[in-house]
Amino acid sequence: MEPVTRVAVRVSFLRSDQPPSRPPRSFPEGAQVVTLSAPSVTYYRYLYDTVGADYLWWLRRVTPDADLAHYLRTPGISVHVLYVGGEPAGFYELDARPWPVVNLSYFGLMPGFIGRGFGGPFLRHAVDLVWRHQARTMTLNTCTADHPRALPGYLAAGFSVYREIEEVWDVPRRLGMKIPPHLPIKG
């Protein structure tokens, strides 16, 4: 058995069944979003590992490269990167395979861009993109390992919680991940 740290998290599942009625907020100057067509595993891991380092994003870290490459080339999967002044500032990933339901699989900012006014407009970019393609429903989940403003941000963007569950994650110690201090560790 691989050594793991057992961590308890509360997962909130959210959905939105209609586009937002409010106009979007503008991005701060110099921001643009680029859709990557089948990003390389190396670049995807850089985005995922950097954005998720403080929030215990670990599942894709244990996915073999070949499996991740196949996934990233799968029709219905798309990765969108926020660039500010040419520098990656965050990314989101959409999974439209259960069309017309689209799941926001991952969403986040690079540490240096948190608290600078990018999160709300970037989330709205994802939401607007989904509705522009005439989806029926948009879903996502967040948990107590995520940034403390994640759930309030999703609620403010028009999502509502439809289910919450408690999970225990077995995070492999070989990943060297920092366990957020507010998460209970199970014995």
Image (spheres, rainbow, N blue to C red):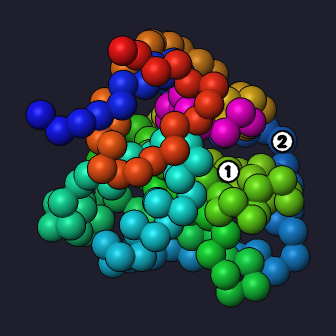
- Crowd band around label 1 with a 10 angstrom C-alpha radius: few (<14), some (14–19), many (20+): many
- On whether residue 114 falls in the magenta region, the answer is no
* Residue 41 seen anywhere in this rendered image of the structure: yes
**Above or below 92: residue 151:** above
Give the mark, 1 or 2, whose residue is nearer the N terminus: 2
Element type at marker 2?
loop
| Residue located at (57% from left, 76% from top) | 34
Q: Which residue is mark 2?
A: 22
| Residue located at (67% from left, 81% from top) | 87
**Above or below 143: residue 48:** below
* Residue 128 seen anywhere in this rendered image of the structure: no
Secondary structure character of the magenta stretch overall: loop
Q: Amino acid at mark 1?
A: Leu
Could you tell whether 21 is left or right of 186 in the image? Answer: right
Residue 33 in picture, x, y percent from top left: 63, 72
**Region rendered in magenta:** 140-149
Q: Amino acid at mark 2?
A: Arg
**Above or below 128: residue 110:** below
| Residue located at (36% from left, 31% from top) | 5
Residue toward you, 27 or 169: 169
Residue 145 in picture, x, y percent from top left: 56, 33
Residue 156 in picture, x, y percent from top left: 77, 32
Could you tell whether 49 is left or right of 39 in the image? Answer: right
Q: Which residue is mark 1?
A: 123
